[in-house]
Image (cartoon, coloured by chain):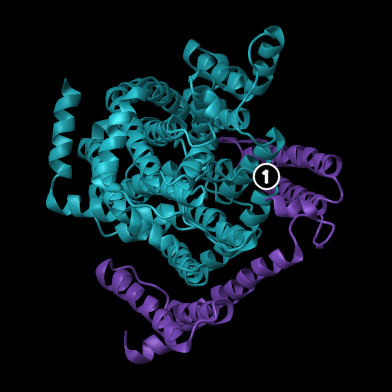
């Protein structure tokens, strides 16, 4: 029960007035970020990272993680009211959320979405509270080979789980590794891939890539698609909320199933988006009213929202316990940890107890505060989306530039941000996934370091990655994840009666 | 998205050429990476694998996967599928070009004045707002940014001659 005591200590940290204030500001900023086009969880957190440099790490992580929760909630608002998914994992929410809004039941849809998000996140936080310390304890035993195995597993899951063609995922990921390798080699102290350009000595910072790829790239996409947002208006009052809450317990089975899917998929990277689709698809197949999914069924909002938030939240588990972020936003938070001088990974649970348990406690409180804020302020947030794009776009561009500049106080980074932005637009249009690219820049150095250390120990033999049961299991899981589509295809060929239909 | 498929009436670059272009660009990146890796050594040195060891294989992976992508791009895309209509690309360029000027202006005149100009341009040119409104938002935003970043959170941002003149 040491964890429980730690958690209560964490609550004491979070309940300091300054941290509560930071939490509310974080949630508000997060919802705004989630609602605005061109700003999502990952680059929103990246842009606001410099604001936290002068705070204590605990307050800083509370603010940033609350921005993340807020952005997750904000995604649901645009999905339901405007049929525009704020984040990829809100796409499935539009299937039934927007039809509900068209039928004048926007209030019910939003209440269901927010409440399910809350339930999913809460489930995942409880899971993190119970499992993260164990994983961290376990991970303390890891040598370089096991560490590389974890990275291998993470990147293989991207290739196997991604909707995009595998060759595109590999290309995007490897370009990330190449960008991450530019600059000083950590092990030999040698410069590489700089080609004599002084600006490249410090390498490419993934924060610049995040702001460019997701921020600028998204604005360019929005510009291309035209600027008219035709939204439904929504009024949420207490009566609607209570009425919807009365109805929701009926879907406890869907909720529980979605929580489990979300947690499972969230721990492996690239999880939130497939989790929301998978949860929606299964709910559609299992539900008695499945045939009516897509026409505004409340269960069709509950399933993807619960799973997406469970996944989004549990993506922080590998980030905290192993130092391997499960999503781009988790990667940005990890980048923040490094900037504040904290080393993510299992040692965090021993050396920075206040920090870790403060963060976990803030996940509980942040989601409660978030739920209250979004339920009460929906009309306000929807109004933000009605601000014309010709005003919002340049302001977002300016904020992106500020965010990019303040990472290293370098105007070269601002230029790079624009280059990444144009590249992000083209890559996205050509169906290259961007998340693996970003995670590869973040983890490139560490993956390479553990790879080379392992090889050093084995005198260059790759057999070290199968040398004991632990590393062998992790590598085998990685290979299964890598070839998952083929395994799945083989399975459905062997079992032709099984329903192979998947939700698009 | 339905808009894009009717292609015949409105022109634009073909999707397959853009996709092939992206793949070829990735091939070039791969060759640069491999070249850079070879330059620092990809074999074993005194302290184990040399600095170019890892990037070399990364480069090979980019090369291999991009060649597959190039082949798919040319094989799978019907030649009449558009990447985007010209009018859409004009919209995109109307952001890219001012932003390019903006990022270079930042080093010369500081972020505040550059931002003022960028916001004013967008509002006046794309939004067609009246001058009063334009000036209010364009001047107000940098002011708010100055107070929030420089005063509250103590984050220094690039400044130019005007700020120097004002002694900020």
Residue bearing the label numbered 1: A431
Residue A65: where, in percent of width, then height?
Answer: 33, 45
Residue B166 placement: quadrant: bottom left
Count all numbered tags in the image, as a single digit: 1
> Can residue A227 be seen by looking at this rendering?
yes
Residue A170: where, in percent of width, then height?
Answer: 66, 37
Q: Residue at x 32, y 69 (%)?
A: B149
Q: Residue at x 51, y 67 (%)?
A: A389
Q: Residue furthest bottom?
A: B165
Identify the chain drawn in purple. B
Identify the chain drawn in cyan. A
Between residue A420 and residue A204, name the one nearer to us: A420
The answer to whether A292 appears left or right of A330 in the picture is right
Q: Relative to residue B152, is residue A150 depicted above or below?
A: above
Q: Relative to residue A71, is residue A132 depicted above or below?
A: above
Q: Relative to residue A356, is residue A33 depicted above or below?
A: below
Residue A325 placement: quadrant: top left
> Can residue A281 be seen by looking at this rendering?
no
Between residue A376 and residue B71, name the one nearer to us: A376
Residue A213: where, in percent of width, then height?
Answer: 56, 54
Image quarter of the C terminus of chain B: bottom left
For disc 1, the chain is A
| Numbered disc 1: secondary structure | loop
Between residue A89 and residue A59, name the one nearer to us: A89
Q: Residue at x 60, y 43 (%)?
A: A177
Residue A295: where, in percent of width, then height?
Answer: 53, 36
The answer to whether A48 appears left or right of A172 in the picture is left
């Amino acid at each position: 029960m040491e964890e429980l005591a730690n958690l209560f200590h964490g609550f004491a940290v979070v309940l300091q007035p300054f941290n509560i204030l930071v939490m509310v500001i974080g949630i508000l900023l997060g919802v705004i970020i989630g609602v605005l086009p061109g700003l999502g969880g990952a680059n929103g957190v990246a842009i606001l990272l410099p604001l936290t440099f002068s705070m204590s790490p605990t307050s800083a992580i509370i603010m940033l993680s609350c921005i993340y929760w807020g952005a997750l909630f904000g995604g649901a608002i645009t999905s339901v009211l405007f049929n525009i998914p704020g984040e990829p994992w809100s796409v499935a929410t539009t299937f039934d959320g927007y039809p509900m809004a068209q039928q004048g039941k926007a209030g019910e849809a939003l209440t269901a979405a927010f409440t399910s998000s809350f339930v999913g996140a809460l489930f995942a936080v409880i899971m993190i509270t119970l499992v993260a310390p164990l994983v961290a304890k376990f991970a303390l035993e890891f040598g370089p080979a096991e560490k590389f195995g974890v990275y291998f597993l993470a990147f293989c899951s991207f290739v196997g789980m991604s909707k995009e063609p595998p060759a595109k995922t590999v290309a995007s990921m490897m370009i990330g590794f190449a960008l991450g390798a530019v600059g000083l080699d950590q092990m030999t102290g040698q410069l590489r891939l700089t080609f004599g350009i002084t600006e490249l000595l410090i390498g490419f910072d993934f924060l610049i890539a995040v702001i460019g790829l997701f921020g600028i790239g998204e604005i360019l996409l929005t510009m291309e698609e035209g600027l008219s947002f035709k939204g439904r208006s929504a009024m949420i009052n207490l009566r609607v909320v209570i009425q919807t809450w009365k109805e929701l317990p009926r879907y406890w089975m869907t909720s529980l199933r979605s929580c489990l899917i979300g947690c499972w998929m969230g721990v492996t990277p690239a999880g939130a988006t497939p989790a929301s689709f998978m949860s929606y698809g299964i709910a559609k197949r299992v539900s008695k009213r499945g045939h009516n999914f897509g026409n505004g069924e409340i269960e069709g909002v509950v399933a993807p929202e619960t799973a997406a938030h469970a996944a989004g939240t549990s993506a922080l588990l590998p980030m905290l316990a192993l130092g391997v972020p499960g999503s781009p936003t988790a990667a940005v938070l990890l980048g923040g940890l490094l900037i504040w001088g904290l080393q993510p990974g299992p040692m965090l649970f021993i050396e920075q107890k206040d920090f870790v348990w403060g963060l976990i406690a803030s996940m509980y409180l942040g989601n409660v505060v978030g739920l209250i804020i979004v339920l009460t302020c929906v009309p306000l947030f929807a109004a933000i989306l009605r601000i014309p794009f010709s005003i919002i776009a340049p302001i977002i561009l300016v904020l992106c530039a500020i965010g990019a500049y303040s990472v290293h106080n370098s105007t070269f980074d601002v230029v790079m941000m624009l280059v990444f932005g144009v590249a992000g637009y083209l890559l996205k249009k050509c169906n290259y996934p961007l998340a693996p690219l970003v995670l590869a820049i973040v983890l490139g150095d560490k993956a390479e370091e553990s790879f080379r250390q392992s090889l050093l120990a084995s005198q260059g033999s790759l057999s070290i990655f199968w040398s004991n049961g632990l590393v062998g299991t992790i590598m085998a899981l990685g290979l299964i994840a890598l070839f998952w589509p083929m395994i799945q295809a083989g399975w459905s060929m062997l079992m032709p009666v099984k329903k192979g239909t998947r939700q698009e | 998205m339905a808009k894009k498929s009717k292609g015949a009436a409105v022109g634009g670059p073909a999707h397959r050429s853009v996709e092939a272009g992206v793949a070829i660009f990735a091939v070039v990146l791969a060759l640069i990476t491999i070249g850079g890796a070879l330059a620092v050594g990809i074999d074993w040195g005194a302290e184990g694998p040399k600095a170019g060891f890892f990037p070399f294989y990364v480069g090979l992976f980019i090369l291999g996967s991009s060649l597959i992508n190039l082949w798919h791009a040319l094989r799978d895309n019907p030649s009449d599928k558009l990447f985007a209509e010209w009018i859409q690309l004009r919209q995109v360029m109307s952001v890219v070009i001012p932003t390019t000027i903006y990022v270079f202006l930042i080093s010369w005149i500081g972020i505040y004045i550059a931002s003022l100009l960028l916001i004013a341009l967008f509002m006046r040119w794309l939004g067609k707002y009246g001058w009063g409104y334009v000036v209010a938002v364009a001047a107000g935003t940098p002011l708010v940014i100055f107070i929030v970043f420089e005063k509250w959170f103590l984050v220094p941002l690039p400044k130019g001659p005007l700020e120097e003149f004002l002694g900020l």
